[in-house]
Amino acid sequence: MRTVLMVVVLFAVSFFGVRWITLGGPVPMVRVVDLKPNPNIPTFTEASRKAVAEQREQEWLESKTAQGDGDPERAKLREAVIETATAFRLSPCNEELKRKYFEAVNAYARAFVVLGGCPNFPHCRDNDAAMEKAKKVFHSPVDGRVREAMSSVHDMGIGIQDYPGPLKIAIDHLSGSSGRGNEGFSCRDVEAPKRAEPRRPSDDPLPRPQRAWEGWNRKDIDRESRERYRKNVLKDLRRPGPALCAGRDRELLIAGLNQYYTTREFEQHGPVKRSREEQIAIEHEWSSGTDQQIDALVRDFYTEGYIRPKDLHASQTVDKVLAGLKPTNRACASAGKS
């Protein structure tokens, strides 16, 4: 009976199904439809660019807020290493800048060994407690910036053996870049790296696969980073007042301006070789209305006395912005600053 009943049901379904179709009844169809992107969910491209831009902004903020150990003399030594390293990287064939960099590093290392109880380094008496204290003091966040500056010089080919004087071992420890620069330094190679000779097909029969990452457009990322630099600098420049004459607000203002102008100087006048068209493009990138507004505010701050000649790192860009101006001390006269 079950079999007979199943046959009857199948017959009925088939009969009425065919009749339904012949009479023009609608037939449900299943089809594949592409998923539409959700505007609330960022694409891989957007997420990648945002992550890189946020990382650069974080590095910028860390460079502005890096703290030392509170000693003003050691603060000057640290800043001298960073400034001279930056200048030397921008002009690697300038012997005077190279000499100043070596002097700054030796003074920085000398302060380390003296605090560590070894003024006659490398001939030292055992003083583990003093040396541990020195290592702790010279391991502050701002000393991390000093290490980065020294490492960047070593990446050009400067080795520990190139430093004059007896403090080479201490310098090696403080730089944290042991082994770099052993290939030798040539300022001409740094200024204008030699082009590699074209490889013949027989030299590399199996070409290396290149992986293209979607959304990683370096020009777009650099452009977004510049905008973040400008935004942060303008935020500081739009708060004039007595707070900018001394204290934490002033430190952030000066550090931010030096970071902005150092980046601008390096991209416009650094050792990277560009075609005439590329140079025009990068000059255009740093000539936006916001850049002109920053320059105008800096000139005003310089004239009024919020910014002093010694505050900004020397560079072609800064010299051009401040050309023909005479600093005063009107804004900060009550703060007792000179």
Image (cartoon, rainbow, N blue to C red):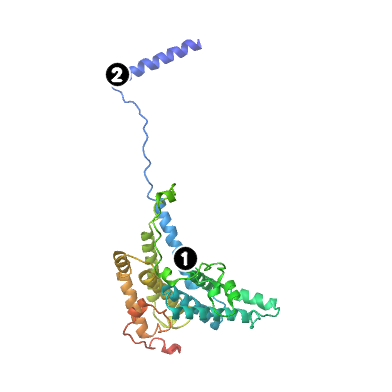
Q: Is residue 210 visible?
A: no
Residue 58 tag number: 1
Q: Are marks 2 and 1 in contact (CB under 8 Å)?
A: no
Q: Position of residue 207 (x, y in %)?
A: 43, 48
In the image, which is nearer the foreground, mark 2 or mark 1?
A: 1
Answer left or right for 223 relative to 98: left
Q: Amino acid at mark 1?
A: Gln
Q: Is residue 295 visible?
A: yes
In front of the other: 313 or 226: 313
Q: Which residue position is annotated with label 2?
A: 22
Q: Is residue 274 above or below residue 11?
A: below
What residue appears at the point 51 percent right and 78 percent down from the top-left corner? 102
Q: Amino acid at mark 2?
A: Thr
Q: CA distance from mark 2 to mark 1?
A: 70 Å
Q: Quadrant of residue 130?
A: bottom right
Q: How many marks?
A: 2
- Per the image, label 1 sits on a secondary structure element best described as helix
- Per the image, label 2 sits on a secondary structure element best described as helix
Q: Position of residue 200 (x, y in %)?
A: 40, 52
- The extreme right residue here reads 126
For the C terminus, give its image quadrant. Answer: bottom left
Q: Is residue 298 above or below residue 43?
A: below
Q: Residues within 10 Å of mark 1 (few under 14, many from 20)?
A: few
